[in-house]
Image (spheres, rainbow, N blue to C red):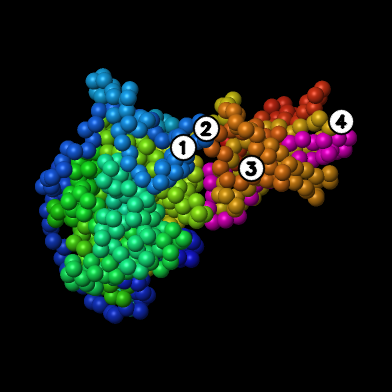
């Protein structure tokens, strides 16, 4: 479980690493244990990287066989199209009955939607490929900077390493431009909680991290469970707004009768975050524990991240399909997409290519398992046989990139479709507008700076996993970022928060260029947390009330904590807000900013800013742009370009005139061509 609490060691705020097992007690106060490391078993070889995930049958081939065009990615902006919010609103307006039939616009079975043989052959080639930063439309300098950030956390963070090793993969479009491994996949063999000492494997016995290292994905498993649920909605077997006990009659009592499928997927069921299933020795006892849990609040009135939601959804899916979750994962998602290194309960032959996780001992763990390596880390998932709706899936960065590309392409990959485009829209629709800051689609978290960093936009979707994993998709730039770390190796108390995720996300966001229309440099605020700066024009004296300040403006700040202020002053010492308007350069309604300040996201679209200077007619005035970034997180920054101050018969200031440009005073702003 990836719980949220107040603070963590590294100053992060929304991801302080509670756990789905026992409470995270103080490891240092634990019982002393021996630090002798048993010789590791040689185990099997790395296995056949191209082999399937085991002998699993049943539903094989039932998904991904629809013949249809390769629809474009979901809409990422405003306009006349069917946006995520509009789609969600329309579906809810239908009384909450969600049945996505083939006649939906853009679906493979819709009229005119079938593709001919040539189109289908073309789709077969739409696979991820390795390429350069340039081929991906990324900036190599900042892309490499993402690796530097990942590597930085191999050192003290602030006291212990954040993780023993990590794999970072990033791409745009169908080009993977970065895939790099740092550190070790297996380093520590034991840990003493009383002394906070570790015993490391001898250097010759450590296993270096590799690009194809398999990770316990932890709560990223929730995404797969959510995808499987939406597939059943497409097929008419499951309704989004139906009560859960329609499918699981045992799920009743204490107010559970009113919990809906949607509330499970959006963590608004009111259920508590966790229950100790690992204390129950039988499956019957585990089920009794779940059936006995009552909502802590009225369903739909609170957001609380809960493993119980996805465990319940697992049981629901298994009930309505007649198949276990691991079989559903294989036959409905991983086999069609060719994700051969993603599965529950990896075989022993995978152990030596799998990242080790925690040395589990009480009191920081609910179980005494020693070094966990090649088996699921989450105590409850382990007790549930390794197959659980909330945790238990193992996979690689490349396989997650395939999943990311599938979703960005509207549910299909290399000719195989697992979801229709309208279903992908549902995954990324914010159903939690009643809970600001906890934006959530069906399974996916949305617009979360606390781990997405500057990749967070109103359209970004992703998730994290307690073991140190994360996935972020940004449809607005058609980009994806995967960071997999073994951050509970050797123990969960050595790290807290999401500092590496944010740092890597910031650098990758910077690698996506912002181009001006004229192709030259623009004034840029930067992306430093806690930074501020001013961009000040020389003194000017408008002759008439028709004078205007105009410029091109692009912004992406954290709402409420990052802002741009436009200000005016008579003496250069006392400044007052200058109201202005903005309008998208691609067309759109004019937006007014009467307080002379804006915050949030411009939609990755340049806007035309205009500020009337009527109040300064006949008087000398100085004008400036001031940016602030006061919070822990930052957006992509602010760009100002083509500065002009003019009136009908007179151009008072023009940035492209060398004399005027030389008189701009910049503090904290730089000229940037990207």
Disc 3 or 2, which lies upstream in sequence?
A: 2
Residue at the image point whose x is 18% and y is 66% from the top? 283
Instruction: State if disc 1 and disc 4 touch (CB < 8 Å).
Output: no
Residue at the image point whose x is 27% and y is 67% from the top? 291
Q: Residues within 10 Å of mark 4 (few under 14, many from 20)?
A: some
Q: Secondary structure at mark 1?
A: loop
Q: Residues within 10 Å of mark 2 (few under 14, many from 20)?
A: few
Disc 4 or 3, which lies upstream in sequence?
A: 4
Total marks in image: 4
Disc 4 or 2, which lies upstream in sequence?
A: 2
Percent from the top left, x then y, of residue 482? 36, 46
Q: Nearer the viewer, mark 4 or mark 3?
A: 4
Residue assigned mark 3: 669
Q: Nearer the viewer, mark 4 or mark 1?
A: 1
Instruction: State if disc 2 and disc 4 touch (CB < 8 Å).
Output: no
Q: Which residues are magenta?
A: 611-637
Residue ranking furthest to the right: 618
Horizontal side, residue 451 vs residue 520: left or right: left
Q: Nearer the viewer, mark 1 or mark 3?
A: 1
Residue assigned mark 4: 543
Residue assigned mark 2: 79
Give me the C-alpha separation between circle 4 and circle 2. Answer: 40 Å
Residue assigned mark 1: 83
Q: Nearer the viewer, mark 3 or mark 2?
A: 2
Give me the C-alpha separation between circle 3 and circle 2. Answer: 32 Å
């Amino acid at each position: 479980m990836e719980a949220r609490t107040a603070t963590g060691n590294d100053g992060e705020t929304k991801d302080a690493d509670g756990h789905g097992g026992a409470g995270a007690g103080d490891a240092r106060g634990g019982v002393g244990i021996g630090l002798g490391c048993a010789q590791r078993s040689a185990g099997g070889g790395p296995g056949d990287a191209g082999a399937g995930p085991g002998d699993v049958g049943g539903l094989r081939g039932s998904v991904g066989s629809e013949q249809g065009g390769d629809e474009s990615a979901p809409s990422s902006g405003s306009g006349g199209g069917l946006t995520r919010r509009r789609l969600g609103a329309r579906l809810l307006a239908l009384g909450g009955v969600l049945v996505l039939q083939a006649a939906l616009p853009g679906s493979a079975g819709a009229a005119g939607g079938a593709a001919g043989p040539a189109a289908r052959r073309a789709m077969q080639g739409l696979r991820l490929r390795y390429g350069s930063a340039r081929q991906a439309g990324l900036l190599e300098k900042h892309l490499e900077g993402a690796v530097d950030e990942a590597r930085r956390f191999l050192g003290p963070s602030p006291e212990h390493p954040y993780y023993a090793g990590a794999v970072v993969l990033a791409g745009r479009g169908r080009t993977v431009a970065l895939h790099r491994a740092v550190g070790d996949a297996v380093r520590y063999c034991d840990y003493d909680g009383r002394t906070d000492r570790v015993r490391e494997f001898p250097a010759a016995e450590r296993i270096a991290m590799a690009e194809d290292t398999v990770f316990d994905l932890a709560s990223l498993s929730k995404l797969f469970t959510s995808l499987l649920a939406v597939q059943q909605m497409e097929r008419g077997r499951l309704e989004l707004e139906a009560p859960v006990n329609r499918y699981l009659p045992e799920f009743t009592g204490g107010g559970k009768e009113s919990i809906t499928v949607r509330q499970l997927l959006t963590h608004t069921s009111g259920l508590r975050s966790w229950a100790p299933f690992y204390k129950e020795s039988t499956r019957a006892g585990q089920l009794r524990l779940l059936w006995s849990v009552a909502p802590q609040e009225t369903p739909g009135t609170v957001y609380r991240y809960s493993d119980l939601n996805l465990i319940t959804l697992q049981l629901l899916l298994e009930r309505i399909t007649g198949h276990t979750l691991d079989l559903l994962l294989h036959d409905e998602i991983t086999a069609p997409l060719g994700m051969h290194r993603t599965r529950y309960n990896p075989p022993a032959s995978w152990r030596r290519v799998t990242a080790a996780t925690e040395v589990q001992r009480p009191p920081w763990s609910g179980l005494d398992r020693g070094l966990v390596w090649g088996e699921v880390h989450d105590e409850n998932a382990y007790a549930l046989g390794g197959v659980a709706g909330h945790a238990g899936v193992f996979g690689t960065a490349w396989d997650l990139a395939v999943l990311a590309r599938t979703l960005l392409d509207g549910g299909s990959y290399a000719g195989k479709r697992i979801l229709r485009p309208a279903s992908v829209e549902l995954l990324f629709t914010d159903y939690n507008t009643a809970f600001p800051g906890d934006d959530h689609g069906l399974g996916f978290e949305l617009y979360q700076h606390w781990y997405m960093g500057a990749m967070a936009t109103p359209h970004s979707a992703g998730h994290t996993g307690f073991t140190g994993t994360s996935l972020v998709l940004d449809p607005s730039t058609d980009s994806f970022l995967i960071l997999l770390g073994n951050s509970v190796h050797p123990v969960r108390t050595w790290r807290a928060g999401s500092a590496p995720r944010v740092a890597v996300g910031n650098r990758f966001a910077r690698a996506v260029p912002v181009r001006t229309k004229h192709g030259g440099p623009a004034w840029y605020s930067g992306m430093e947390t806690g930074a501020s700066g001013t961009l000040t024009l020389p003194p000017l004296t408008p002759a008439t009330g028709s004078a205007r300040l105009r410029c091109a403006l692009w912004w992406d700040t954290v709402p409420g904590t990052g802002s741009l202020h436009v200000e005016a002053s008579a003496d250069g010492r006392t400044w007052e807000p200058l109201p202005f308007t903005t309008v998208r350069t691609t067309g759109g309604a004019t937006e007014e900013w009467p307080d002379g300040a804006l915050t949030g996201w411009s939609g990755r679209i340049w806007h035309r800013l205009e500020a009337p200077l009527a109040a300064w007619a006949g008087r000398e005035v100085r004008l400036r742009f001031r940016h602030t970034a006061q919070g822990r997180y930052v957006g992509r920054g602010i760009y100002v370009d083509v500065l002009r101050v003019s009136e009908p018969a007179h151009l008072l200031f023009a940035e492209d005139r060398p004399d005027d440009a030389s008189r701009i005073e910049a503090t904290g702003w730089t000229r940037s061509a990207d």
